[in-house]
Image (cartoon, helix red, strand yellow):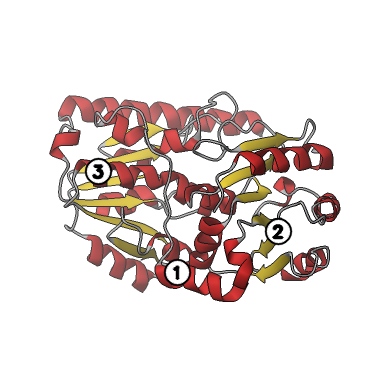
Amino acid sequence: MGFLREERRAAGRAIVRGLRKLRGIIGRPPALPSPREIPARILIIRPYFLGDIVLSLPVAQALRRARPDARISWLCRAEWTPLLRGQAAVDEVIAWPKSGLREWRALIRFLRRRFDLVLALSWDRATPWIAWATGAPHRVGIEEFGRPRLSSLLHTHPIAAPERTTDPRPMADFYFEPLRLMGFGAREEAPRLSPTAEQEQTVVERLGALADSGYLLVHPGGRLRNKRWPLERLAELLRRLNSSERPAVVLVCGPGEEAWAADLARELPPGKGAFWPSPTLEEFIALARRARLFLGNDSGPMHMAAAAGCRVVAVFGGDPRRWRPCGEGHRTVVGATGVESATVEAVFEAVMQTWASAPSR
């Protein structure tokens, strides 16, 4: 069965390649605009996941720098829209429909003929169809590596996704590939996230004097369990941070993680720590902006913290090159046989050394 499945995939790839050549013979797509010719109406499609959306932000930032008056829209799932609202590089955030034919039809009607350039930074099944339905003359999209679907022909300029095991490029660089195709050169900026004044005030009011102490922000969770550093090791690390010379700690967690995070919070010393369960995305950006250092796993919050301007220590269970935090001054601790093998001593040393070199807040 495995052999037959691979045969079908190979046949599918051959068909797509043949159709692509035929399209090139019949008529080539219009040339992509150069950085000096950026159109006024741009749509970026990156519906999920949190970390991937953050790592895609340099695309919007570069477009904004190339054409400050462009209207840049972003299509993503509803739960991530608060992340992008209010960010300088994005003018409009459009919610990806949850379900229902009526919602999808309404979205297509809304998107139709509104854009001159679509950058589809996702290789799921729906994205090529949405990009095509906009009617934009330029549609740059990512197709799944080694498994090009017929739907990839809906892009005027398809790009192969990175091979998972042999391509070591940081994902932020890969998401920038459509702009490289347009002549922008290499990515120059790290992702940037800025809190609103209102959210910063919320953090100050809730944390009190701790808000100005340059605290260590700790997020022990993450979407994938196999990327989480064991809680018992994090608890031991927090106990080691309890002395008066060590940084104050603000512990946060995501939705559904409150119960076990509350157990960890018992390790925080009175007056030198705080527990903030399930902050909103906007609140987390403000928390990270005021923190001196972030400690967490290979996760979306790790990328958010780095984008908010906070130094990061991240615990990885494998090669960190593709998913490491963007920017300078960050450190990764890699477990030799998985994230659970990263030692408390190694993480503690990374935290204290990075804390000492991080700028005070």
Name above or below for residue 340 compared with residue 110. above
Residue at 41%, 45% (x, y): give it: 56
Task: Tell me how far mark 1 sits from mark 3, CA to CA.
Answer: 35 Å
Tell me the residue that label 1 is attached to. 99
Distance (Cα) linking label 1 and label 2: 44 Å
Which residue is rendered at x = 35% and y = 47% of the image? 128
Q: Nearer the viewer, mark 3 or mark 2?
A: 2
In the rendered view of the protein, which quadrant contains the C terminus? bottom right
Image coordinates of residue 262 in percent, x first then y, are 77, 69
Residue 172 seen from this side:
yes
Q: In which quarter of the image is residue 110?
A: bottom left
Front-most of 150 and 82?
82
Which residue is label 3 attached to?
65
Mark 2: amino acid: Ala
Cα separation between marks 3 and 2: 38 Å
Residue 278 seen anywhere in this rendered image of the structure: no
Q: Earlier in the sequence, mark 3 or mark 2?
A: 3
Corner quadrant of residue 207: bottom right
Task: Say what secondary structure mark 2 lies in.
Answer: loop
Residue in front for this viewpoint, 349 or 6:
349
Q: Identify the amino acid type marked 1.
A: Ser
Residue matched to label 2:
248
State the image coordinates of residue 157 (x, y, percent, origin top left).
28, 34
